[in-house]
Amino acid sequence: MIKKSDIVSTVRMLQEEHLDVRTVTMGINLVECACRDIRATAAAVEKKLKLKAGNLVRICNDLSAQYGLPVVNKRLAVSPASLLLEGHNRSGALLLAKAMDRAAAEVGVDLIGGYTALVQKGMTPGEKVLIESLPEVMAQTGRVCASVNVATTKAGMNVDAIRMMGTTILHMARATKSKHGFGAAKLVVFANIPEDNPFMAGAFLGSGEPEYVINVGVSGPGVVKRSIDRLIKTRPDCSLGEIAEEVKHTAFRVTRSGELMGREVAARLGIPFGVVDLSLAPTPRVGDSVGEIYMAMGISKLGAPGTTAAVALLNDAVKKGGAFASSSVGGMSGAFIPVMEDHALARAVEEGTLTIEKLEAMTAVCSVGLDMILLPGDTAPETICGLIMDEAAIGMINRKTTGVRVIPVPGRKVGDRVDFGGLFGSGTVTNVNCPDGAAVFVNRGGHIPAPIQSLGN
């Protein structure tokens, strides 16, 4: 039975605490569009996207008005574009990406993901073309987002692909120098990439998914933070276990709201509903920060000893609350730590209390990994490769998704400020404590074998 207190709490989240559906993402399979003529392929892709996603934004807006629950972003996620690029070259890849970009603009979505290659065990010619085209694609499109999966627990780690990504990320940043290297902010390098993730830049439609599907990403760091504030105000001596229980109950209500919206959108479009991803994805807005949640728990300086434990508590409680609320929880559900997109995390990096090394430790127990971190423009490719390898190792060994989204800002050095605006936020250029010393190891290349954990059958 629904309790009156739950109804009151949900109304408060909507009216006072700015609860929103962070994204409704429509997945579309484009494999049928493949043909020998890349121009025909691009035309078929553009046509299918416009036809199938033409009503997505209108339906989301109508339901937002009906339920009073804002949908902040409307997005598309397509099957890996590399599948359409076999037998084609970089100019063909750019043609395809521009077709995706035009279609996304015409249907009115904010971003389109799926410019993706899965290279954890090897690389096909189409995947190689996709990676090589990334600098041009990110410089010449506005809505296209990319992802590359370089490791899985089952397959191990493709170090040769990682070496390629280290150089590519630098080229992407330089190709968008006028925008402070923003092109690199639209790429995530993954280990154990999820096939149903609605969040960008890593969203794509996996091979095990339906031809069309609606996945919903529900955030709510502000809602969680305020629920902890209320608990501590009423019970100043509350324990960490009681804080975890409060987060669980809050996550339950947030998940329910998001699933309602997702199922309604799917029903009106006449396609299946997939998952609700309850990830606490922050924005630069004060009061909508994951970092503020840790501070509310009692971590007065982010990066202090105990920060990783606070991340683990929050991540686990969010997942437990979401799993109880819905049998369709998926994606990467948990707590994100995108530095530039979270004003509290960004301030801690600027003040020097939160380092890349501490962030790496936090990624072992949070969702995803090193996210939206600004690096000096002269960062060596081997340094970027080392960061990717370390995160991939954490994901591979622990059977979890990890990722790296770093932006080497051309012409900028440690301590400089960079502002991307909007949801992408602003931050301070930082660097690893020991940027040199791994070049020989990285440049050995090859393949790190799958860990013993892969033998789980």
Image (cartoon, rainbow, N blue to C red):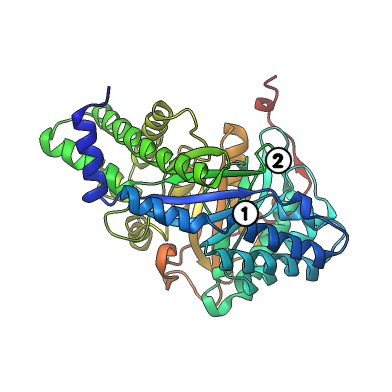
Residue in view at x 80 percent, y 58 percent: 85
- Horizontal side of 389 relative to 440 (left or right) equals left
Q: Earlier in the sequence, mark 1 or mark 2?
A: 1
| Spatial CA span between label 1 and label 2 | 19 Å
Q: Amino acid at mark 2?
A: Ser
Q: Quadrant of residue 65?
A: bottom left
- Compared with residue 358, is residue 115 higher up or lower down, i.e. above or below? below
- Compared with residue 188, is residue 394 higher up or lower down, i.e. above or below? above
Q: In which quadrant is the C terminus drawn? A: top right
Residue topped by disc 1: 52
Q: Are marks 1 and 2 in contact (CB under 8 Å)?
A: no
- SS class of the residue under badge 2? loop
Q: Nearer the viewer, residue 223 or 44?
A: 44
Residue topped by disc 2: 207
Labelled disc at residue 278 = none
Label 1 vs label 2, nearer the camera: 1
